[in-house]
Image: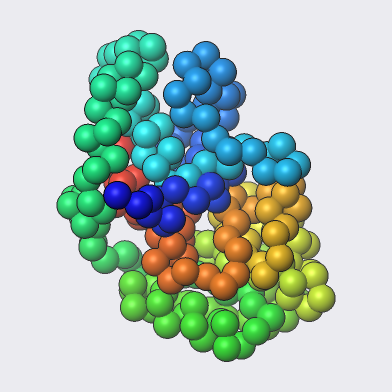
Amino acid sequence: MEDNPERTDAIYSIGAVARMLGVPAQTLRAWEERYQQIVPARSEGGQRLYSRDQVDQLSFIRNQIAQGLQPADAHRLLAQHHNEAASIPAEQHPNAQASVEAATTVLLAERDPYAAEFAEYFLRTEGYVVRIVLEPAAAADILRDEPPSVLVVDLLIAGGAGLALCRAARDNGSVPVLAVSAVDQRDQAFAAGAEAFLLKPLDPLQFVSTIRDLIGTSAFLRQRN
């Protein structure tokens, strides 16, 4: 069976994973170094990059520890169930098609109005409220005055002002950022505060699932509650 790129692409920073799972980044590093079971990819700049499958596995580990297992035992249990868990189709996960709250707002800061319309279509289909801006100044105003649930920023907006928007969202402290770009700028994006990076052209399913993960409404993240 071929891997599903939606689940195997390494797109999440360690900060994003720590926030989504409620596990300190230093704990994730310790598990990686001690057990060598969930080893993230590395970007050219040395950033740890996790896939959705790996976040799923870390969620399993965290849940087992919460139920009383020691970390070593939780990792052994993951190893025993890894093949079975990896074979479960995404549509069989509970609440995989659950609707999101109408108040969930996605801010799209795009340089290309056609790309913005494309992304907006898929997000609105999932029930999100979408705001589109084509200028960095307008996006910065919204981040300051009406923070969205998540910011999607094209790093090449206005000739490359997207990194400044990532930093503005990081300074806000509560707005997760998905950076997108037609060129590979993942290291710069993560350094500026982005929590995930996707290379254009965007795959619609991967794009929407990444938004869900960052907002915390993904079906596989719900399982931790």
* Count of marks overlaid on the render: 0
Name the quadrant containing residue 182: bottom right
**Of 141 and 113, the residue lying toward us:** 113
**Of 210 and 44, the residue lying toward us:** 44
**Of 173 and 94, the residue lying toward us:** 94
**Does the rendering let one see residue 147?**
no
Identify which residue is drawn at 75% across, 61% down: 163
Name the quadrant containing residue 166: bottom right
Q: Residue furthest right?
A: 159
The spot of residue 145 in percent (x, y) is: 63, 69
**Colour pattern of the rendering:** rainbow
* Above-or-below relation of 75 to 89: above
Identify which residue is drawn at 80% across, 70% down: 160
* Horizontal side, residue 31 vs residue 158: left or right: left
Q: Residue furthest front?
A: 1
* Horizontal side, residue 69 vs residue 7: left or right: left
Q: Residue furthest bottom?
A: 114
* Horizontal side, residue 159 vs residue 131: left or right: right
* Above-or-below relation of 148 to 40: below
The spot of residue 78 in percent (x, y) is: 31, 24
**Does the rendering let one see residue 113?**
yes
The spot of residue 156 in percent (x, y) is: 74, 72
Identify which residue is drawn at 57% across, 82% down: 115
Assign the C terminus to one quadrant of the image.
top left
The spot of residue 45 in percent (x, y) is: 75, 42
